[in-house]
Image: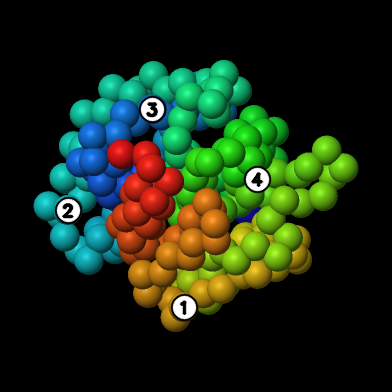
Amino acid sequence: MKSGTRHPTGFWAEEFIKPHKAFLAEDYEVHIATPRGRPPTVDPLSLSLGYNDNNQQSVDDQKAYIAAQDAIKKPLVLGDINPANYSAVFTVGGHGPMQDLAVDPDIGNIIAAMLGANKVYATVCHGPASLLSVFDKDGNWLFKGKKLTGFSNEEENQATFAGDAPWLLEDRLRLAGANYVKLAPWTPHVVVDGNLVTGQQQVSSQVTAEAVIKRLKELGVK
């Protein structure tokens, strides 16, 4: 953190589980990839009672779902991914992407390739930090003027991280030139701008996945 203290983080469980289930329900083949192919870490807060309406069954179900996914234990190497083989790429949020995907050249190259074709790139919550890795050959950010959303400053404040966070996603996206839009904190919200699909926070996971599926069908991907 900004203060020098260490804060355990990773990907947000709900933001993986709900889209994963939605894509499998449509019979899409789903692969999981991470930087250097390392098994991703679940953000412990995402499996805490406080972030799950004090519902222990919900926590247990999420833990069981993640544990059952062999692809999480042995993910593909992000740098080996050929975007030509995929119709969509979906980046899960959590504070993990703020630390790695915001500066990862592999995800940047993948996103640029996806948006340069008849494909979809989608991301939710803190996942839009990955967009900060995408530049054209002249060093221009590809999302300047693009309408998008992501975890808001208000939500970061209410989650008590804003004061000690190294940087805030909403601020960085706005400074980069994005047309950032948001709804009231914790309101399901998805923004579609062409083949870019973004969701505001974890409660937007389902609607973001549904928007991806709708867009793929519009593009003729069954």
Check residue 6 in the rendering and tell me which mark sits there, or answer none: none
Q: Quadrant of residue 48?
A: bottom left
- Look at 72% across and 51% down and name the residue there: 142
Amino acid at pointer 3: His
In the depicted view, which residue is nearer to us: 2 or 39? 39
Q: Specify few, some or many for label 4: CA neighbours under 10 Å numbering under 14, 14-19, or 20 or more.
A: many
Residue indicated by mark 1: 183
Query: Disc 2 vs disc 4: Cβ atoms closer than 8 Å?
Result: no
Element type at mark 3: loop
Q: Specify few, some or many for label 3: CA neighbours under 10 Å numbering under 14, 14-19, or 20 or more.
A: few
- Look at 51% across and 45% down and name the residue there: 121
Task: Compute the Cα span from label 2 to label 3.
Answer: 25 Å
Residue indicated by mark 4: 102
Q: Earlier in the sequence, mark 1 or mark 3?
A: 3
Q: Earlier in the sequence, mark 1 or mark 2?
A: 2
Left/right of residue 81 with respect to residue 23 in the rendered view: right
Q: Is residue 15 visible?
A: no
Task: Compute the Cα span from label 1 to label 2.
Answer: 26 Å
* Residue 69 image offset from top left, x and y in percent: 26, 28
Amino acid at pointer 4: Ala
Q: How many marks?
A: 4
Task: Compute the Cα span from label 1 to label 3.
Answer: 31 Å
Residue at the extreme bottom: 184
Q: Earlier in the sequence, mark 4 or mark 1?
A: 4
Residue indicated by mark 2: 58
* Residue 2 image offset from top left, x and y in percent: 68, 57
